[in-house]
Amino acid sequence: MSKPYQVLARKYRPHTFGEMVGQTHTVKTLMNALDNNNLHHGFLFTGTRGVGKTTIARIFAKSINCESGVSSNPCGKCVTCLEIDKGQSVDLIELDAASHTGIDNMRDILENAQYMPTKNRYKIYLIDEVHMLSKSSFNALLKTLEEPPEHIKFLLATTDPQKIPITVLSRCLQFTLQKLTVEEILSQLKFIMDTEGLEYEEFALNQIADFGNGSMRDALSLLDQSISYGNGSVTTKDVKDMLGLVHHNDIITLAKRLFNQDVQACIDFVRMLSHKGENLTQVLKDLSSLLHQISVAQILDTIEISDDVKMLSTQISNQDLQLFYHIAINGNKELPLAPSEQIGLEMTLLRMLAFRSNTTALTTPKKKNTRQSTNT
Ligand SMILES: [Zn+2]
């Protein structure tokens, strides 16, 4: 088509604080500091991948170097703002510590730090994954942080603040960025699809938002993939196929077998899913969601539910649902530790059945019809 394709994460990267999705606490604090011109010399942004650490740092860099003055609302039009947006500003030195671990690099950087900025108000160092710096590099950084020249700002970002020396931490204002919620990601995905004029099913976007697991960048790259997979549209079926999500009917079947306490049938079914190459972590997650739906359906008869959920809600007590849900959530946590996904899932299901409250003891294979009664 006409223009070369630009990945969504880049195309829709926020350029102002107003465009930021989530992180309201951090954004508000930074905006206040900027508007009152009350600026520290070292900032540390922590948080998992794709939550906006370097994006916030770049907007901050524009805010303090914009030619129309320091404010929370950089003009976005002056040469400096444009250069920062394009990654071409000489006074914004961006480093990825993951690839600059040697002392030589740091020494170069610090030797340059004493000189005035080339053309802007501040010389800004944006060091990503700063925890990857070597010990000697940290010492070099610390030297400048201890007595920072007026014209220097350090913007540090990391996914792993535990690895940063306390001496560096204590000289920075620290901001902890949160994982984004499904709702925050979903609303951005919808905004993008609407802006691009592309068709989508809302549930499909919801699945992508959920799969992003708090990372906007991950969700946007999934959205990129599914747009090209679906040749311009995003449907639930395509997303399911693409992400290897488990089909709803399989989860219903598993729940039925579980509620029937049919151990053999449960195990057989898990092995069948495993054989098909299904994502068993997702099976357990989807089972948890189903248990939640059934629980709500038992309590609120006003909500709309499918026939399957209605039927299942009559086959299990509320207490057992709570127990199953609890075991499912914990099973999910333990799944990475299990010898295999399949073993982890099987053990989780067996634990549900072992602890189920209001029934007779389980026996394998299958249930026996008679129990020996005792006299006394
Ligand atoms: Zn500007």
Image (spheres, rainbow, N blue to C red):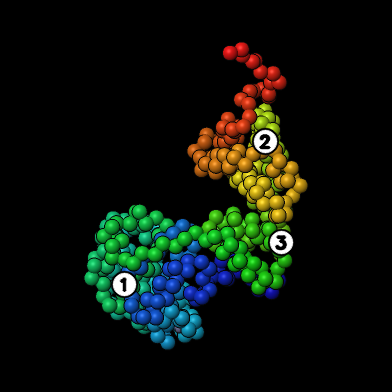
Task: Please indicate whether residue 143 sits to the left or right of residue 237 in the image.
Answer: left
Q: Quadrant of residue 181?
A: bottom right
Graded by Cα atoms within 10 Å as few (under 14), some (14 to 19) or many (20 or more), the crowding at tag 2 reads many
Query: Which residue is at the far front?
Result: 376
Graded by Cα atoms within 10 Å as few (under 14), some (14 to 19) or many (20 or more), the crowding at tag 1 reads some
The residue wearing badge 2 is 259
Q: Position of residue 371 (x, y in %)?
A: 66, 18
The residue wearing badge 3 is 201
Q: Nearer the viewer, residue 2 or 34?
A: 34
Q: Earlier in the sequence, mark 1 or mark 2?
A: 1
Q: Position of residue 186 (x, y in %)?
A: 61, 63
C-alpha gap between disc 1 and disc 2:
60 Å
Amino acid type, callout 1:
His
Q: Secondary structure at mark 2?
A: helix
Q: Is residue 139 above or below residue 16?
A: above
Residue shown at 72% from the left, 66% from the top: 199
Q: Quadrant of ligand 1?
A: bottom left
The residue wearing badge 1 is 41
Can residue 308 be seen in this snapshot? yes
